[in-house]
Amino acid sequence: MGRDRCSGQPWLASNAHPNGHECAKGAATLHHGFPNAAHQLSTPHSDPEEETKMWLFGKGAEERPGRHAHGATHHEAHLDAVEAAWLGLSVGTHGHRHLRGIGKCGPRRWPKSRLYVSHGKRRGGRSRPDESLPDRGEALPGAWGPGLQPLRKVGSASGTMLLRAAWRRAAVAVTAAPGPKPAAPTRGLRLRVGDRAPQSAVTADTTSAPEAGPVLRPLYMDVQATTPLDPRVLDAMLPYLINYYGNPHSRTHAYGWESEAAMERARQQVASLIGADPREIIFTSGATESNNIAIKGVARFYRSRKKHLITTQTEHKCVLDSCRSLEAEGFQVTYLPVQKSGIIDLKELEAAIQPDTSLVSVMTVNNEIGVKQPIAEIGQICSSRKVYFHTDAAQAVGKIPLNVNDMKIDLMSISGHKIYGPKGVGAIYIRRRPRVRVEALQSGGGQERGMRSGTVPTPLVVGLGAACEVAQQEMEYDHKRISKLAERLIQNIMKSLPDVVMNGDPEHHYPGCINLSFAYVEGESLLMALKDVALSSGSACTSASLEPSYVLRAIGTDEDLAHSSIRFGIGRFTTEEEVDYTVEKCIQHVKRLREMSPLWEMVQDGIDLKSIKWTQH
């Protein structure tokens, strides 16, 4: 049995230090595990509340004065594990430890993901799993309760610094709160420890203000609206938020050169994901701006010879509004209908192309019903007719394989926050050979080859590049896992509830976007009933409207069914338990709402609702 170089104490069988952490032999790194039934660390400070008090008031520092090479006392090192657990952070989604603390994933992966927290450096740098910790998708045991996401990577020094600051704020709130401590979170809800309103820079008088308790947050099942930031992406972004803050367009000093190098690396990462040349990637603020540049830019540049565009009736609102704006400028736009499956008829597309058609714009994966259009076939038609082809791929990039050259795509819109990257950043692919020309929408310093003026936000584009790189590595695994969860959700709902309709083509479909209509139930009522699950009835851009979805109307869905539709989004961090909980609650509330519905009662009595002539009083 070896001995810890820090304290001389013998290691336990699990290589766990008696004070709650493990010390690698000959190394200055602490790797903390979270105990479960098979892995209990022998520590005199296992109570998080006691650990909090010790952290705040320094009690016990003289009891364990030894320090590690990276400067953390035993007491501080053990609290790293506690603080991560209290904050609900998670690490290691890809299944191995980051021993060098650089926050990047190599090609080597272990077959099953493990939970851990890792920071600092270790000699050798080899990855190994902790066989005693839970697999990905398992709920944390004990006080944390089921329904919580597994822990992900902390990893970097800057991440640890920010983690400590957040922990201290949470710890102060927990220790200062009067009365009994909050109970463990219930199933289906996430707990935010000490969650209160954002702190103001000006100190306010809080003597009379009541203390707010912990906030229970619903499960997140709306990944088509946005996705959570992948911790690996955050790790890549942090240095450019803190240390490397130069303007990437400053050419006279090292600060600018560092940022420019990071920006060009991100451009390469985005291009690699879609099979493009890095010089064909232009950074934007998101897919909405990219769509505007593609549609308005191409139409206006070629307006002297071509004044006709083609799109579909189920496109995103920003595409449809851009086309309406061009109609006001004198352009002619053809809005192709879609079949009941949601897929366009290629013969209708071919017939709609005119000699003066400049652009065809068709979405790759629909954001409401998840239908995949035949992009390669559309690209072939457009190429043969000398018409530029644009696709809004915000819901497809990083989720399904795409290659702009094989599919003959001339312009493509990309969004960062749809692929577990930061919000406020996106990109547009614009083909160079044969060259596609666009008219810039805004004037300025001529950045991004004159197509999109404005300073490129280095941290955001670094995050977009990292998100694309992670997506490329995880795409196959994510798709298999999401497909399995989607099948589980659909089958469990449909075998328990009659009169449930899946909207869109079940074959040509991205599995992470499921749109179901529950007959004889008002969709908004069901959403309100499912208050502990974050869902939507359609696009976030049009969710404020009480009108039924124009996408569902376009595929021929009856208005009553269109009003009863719910969109379920399954993503990289969705667990089986979350899917099962959503199914259970959905079945429960649909049955309850149907029992209250007179229409359901009439159907049960054998009355054909379509035969009834309704009158308005």
Image: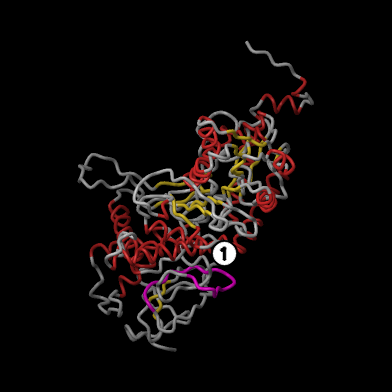
Range drawn in magenta: 105-121
Would you place residue 531 above or below residue 223 in this image? above
Q: Secondary structure at mark 1?
A: helix
Residue 386 appears at what percent x and percent y?
64, 48
Which quadrant holds residue 161? Answer: bottom left
Can you name the residue that lies furthest to the bottom here?
Answer: 1
Q: Which residue is mark 1?
A: 474
Q: In the image, 495: left or right of 203? A: right
Asked whether, in this view, residue 129 is left or right of residue 476, the answer is left
Q: Is residue 381 left or right of residue 234?
A: right
Give residue 616's position: percent from left, percent from top.
Answer: 64, 13
Task: Tell me where residue 288 appears, x and y as whole percent.
Answer: 48, 44
Q: Is residue 216 left or right of residue 581?
A: left
Q: Residue type at mark 1: give it.
A: Glu
Image label count: 1
Asked whether residue 348 appears in the rendered view, the answer is yes
